[in-house]
Image (cartoon, grey):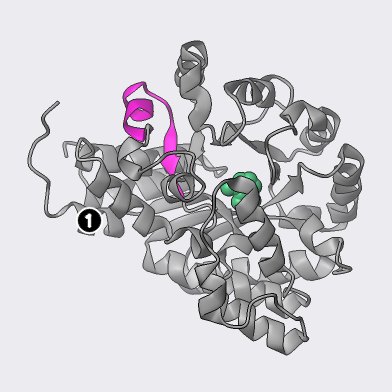
Amino acid sequence: MTHPPADPSLPALLQRMPKAELHIHIEGSLEPELIFRLAERNGVKLAYPSVEALRAAYAFTDLQSFLDIYYAGASVLLKEADFFEMAWAYFERAAADNVVHAELFFDPQTHTDRGVPIEAVIVGLTHACRRAHAEFGISAKLILCFLRHLSEEAAFATLEAALPYREHFIGVGLDSSERGHPPEKFSRVFARARELGLHVVAHAGEEGPAAYIETALDDLKVQRIDHGVRCVESPALVRRLAASRVPLTVCPLSNVKLCVFPTLAAHTLPQLLAAGLCVTINSDDPAYFGGYINTNFVETFAALPQLGRAHARQLALNSFEASFVDVAHKARWRAQLDAVIPADA
Ligand code: ADE
Ligand code: ZN
């Protein structure tokens, strides 16, 4: 298929347009420099001698090879101030990328299992969210993720431990090693979360099969699927996702780094958009995968010349539609988007 010549103004538009980020693991924003600084401050011994050696280890073959390094990196986080600093560093980058709203995943079990009080995690992150709103006007919310390689019982204990801080997070999610840990393992804890009025999302169909997307929808009753790119293996599921507009929070650079797709040019994002799915672009673990949200947008559009400014506008609109905010906020961001990319783009 031939495509019109590349639009030279597109990268600047992608960067300038307002957008919501809905799939960012805040522990995945921990840059090597900050890992080393916190390790020294907290007396934590790292397996790598230098920032450069650590960065050189970021060559992943699959999800698990990444998670092993990601959990080791998170081991430097001990105090409330550490969680604040990590999230604040992310918000500075998000503001520069014109993120107007961010829903941050955090993994309490990664920290509580090392003896860190859940209070230090949630309070540190909450302070950064409040300051991001005050200084940058970013509306920032937290989503507590359960580690799916651990038991349902451990997920229940984590939810109960977090309840004193209930007003500080808006939802629960499910992340970590996907294969062999289907969503339905967590049906009861997700039912409890829904009873508590929490939003519910889950990683599914990143490395795991399309069937995991179906059980996330049917058993966990999730409102969004994180990744979900393997839905293309089931045409019926693609039709269901298009009809329901259940969003997929797609992370293109992550998918290439974790070998879900061989290259960005091979990514199925254009097909998902063409099929009418509510897909969004996100960074996942930007410190590990080569870039924050704007880098994801710019590199994805550069690799897929069939994507133009109408797709850019649609992706920004999808990010607002998929966010857990009221209609007034969504309308305000749509008006801001109109000023950058008008509806007839
Ligand atoms: N935790 C952090 N990043 C993740 C990913 N891409 N998939 C599953 N769990 C994760
Ligand atoms: Zn993720």
- Looking at the image, is 54 positioned above or below residue 288? below
**x and y percentages locating residue 143 in the rendered image:** 67, 50
- Looking at the image, is 269 positioned above or below residue 294? above
Alpha-carbon neighbours of circle 1 within 10 Å: few (<14), some, or many (≥20)?
Answer: some
Image-based side of 61 in relation to 219, left or right: left
**In the orientation shown, which residue stands out farthest toward the left?**
5
Tell me if I can see residue 31 in this picture. Answer: no
Quarter of the picture holding the N terminus:
top left
- Quadrant for residue 97, please give it: bottom left
**x and y percentages locating residue 255 in the rendered image:** 47, 44
Image-based side of 237 in relation to 192, left or right: left
Image-based side of 247 in relation to 335, left or right: right
The span picked out in magenta is 269-282
Quarter of the picture holding the C terminus:
top left
Residue placed under numbered mark 1 in the picture? 11
Inspect the magenta stretch and tell me whether residue 317 lies in it.
Answer: no
For the point 54% across and 54% down, the residue is: 60
- In the image, what residue type sits under mark 1? Pro
Q: Closest to the observer: 209 or 222?
A: 209
For the point 46% across and 37% down, the residue is: 321
For the point 56% across and 65% down, the residue is: 29
- Quadrant for residue 320, please give it: top left
